[in-house]
Image: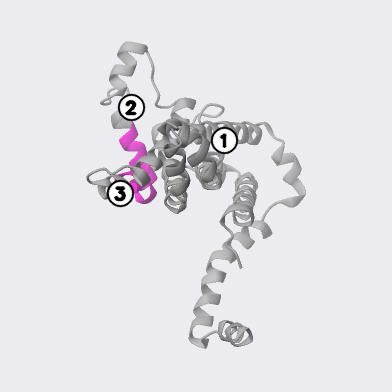
Amino acid sequence: MTKTRRSARGRLPAVLVLPAVLGLAFLVIPLIGLLVRAPWSTLPDRLFSTAVGEALRLSLVCATLATAICVVLGVPLAWLLARADLPGRGVLRALVTVPLVLPPVVGGVALLLVLGRRGLIGQYLYEWFDVSLPFTTAGVVVAEAFVAMPFLVIAVEGALRGADPRYEEAAATLGASRWLTFRRVTLPSVLPGVVAGSVLCWARALGEFGATITFAGNFPGETTTMPLAVYLALETEPDAAIVLSVVLLLVSVAVLAGLRERWIRGTA
C-alpha cells in the first residue's frame, strides 16, 4: 500500500511539468544572473566601504526597532482577532491585512497625511511636543512597521487558532487570571508562531522601499537604508548596486531557509 502511494505521488502529469519548470526558471534565473554579474573581485572592498556600512547599519537598526514595535502591538492584535468575539471581525481582519496588498508608495502617502506636520495627528505632535516624524530615522521605523506588521499578525493569529484551548480553560478553572493565562499558557504555546512572524516581519522591514522613500525620504546616514542605497547606486555606480543587492538576497535566503527548517516545515 505504501509503495502504491509513493508511486502515485511520484508520477507527475506531463502537461504540468513544462509550466512548472518554466515557473521555476522565471523565479530563479534573475537571482542567478545577479550572482553571476556580481563584482566578486572587488566585493570585500565594497562591502566594507563607508556608504555600504552606514546603509547596512541603518537598515539593521531600523528593521529591528520596527519589528519590536510590531511584536508589542501585533501580538495583542492577533489575539484579539483570534479569540475575541467582536462584531465585524472579518472587516477588521481585512483592514489589518490591507498593507499586504496596498502599494507601499500609497502607504507612505497615507502616513504623510496622518503623521506629517500638517497631518491629522502629526500637526498636534509637532505643535504640542515638537515631534516631526517625516524625513527622519524614526520615520523609517514607522514606515517599516506599517508595512511589515501584517506578516506578524497573520502568523500569530494562525498559531492562536491552531492552539488547543483546553489548556487555557484548565488554567482558568484553576483560578488563573486572563493575563496570567495569556502570559504563562497561551504565549508559550504559540511562541513558534510569534518567532516565525517576527522573523518574516524583520525581513520585510529590511527590504522596504516605497513607503520609506515616500515618508522618510532618502538622506544618507539618516534615512538611506539598503534598498534606497541600491536605488541610488544603480544610477551612478551599478557595481555597488549589485553588491548591495547580493547582500539583501543572501539575508532573505538565510531568513527563509531558517524559517523552513525550524518553524514552517511540516511533518513527513
Characterize the magenta stretch by its predominant secondary structure: helix
Question: Could you tell me how far apart the alpha carbons at marks 2 and 1 are, in whole angstroms?
Answer: 22 Å
Q: Which mark is residue 94?
A: 3
Residue ID at (43%, 41%): 149
Secondary structure category for the residue under label 3: helix
Span of residues in magenta = 95-111
Disc assigned to residue 59: 1
Q: Position of residue 53 (x, y in %)?
A: 66, 33
Q: Earlier in the sequence, mark 1 or mark 3?
A: 1
The label on residue 115 is 2
- Decide: is 222 above or below 84: above
Q: CA distance from mark 2 to mark 3?
A: 23 Å
Check if residue 101 falls in the magenta segment. yes
How is colour applied across the structure in the image? one colour
User: Could you tell me how far apart the alpha carbons at marks 1 and 3 are, in whole angstroms?
Assistant: 29 Å
Q: Is residue 245 magenta?
A: no
Image quadrant in which the N terminus is located: bottom right
How many residues crowd around disc 3 within 10 Å: few (fewer than 14), some, or many (20 or more)?
few
Q: Give the residue type at disc 2.
A: Leu
Nearest to the observer: residue 45 or residue 264: 264
Of tags 2 and 3, the one toward the viewer is 3
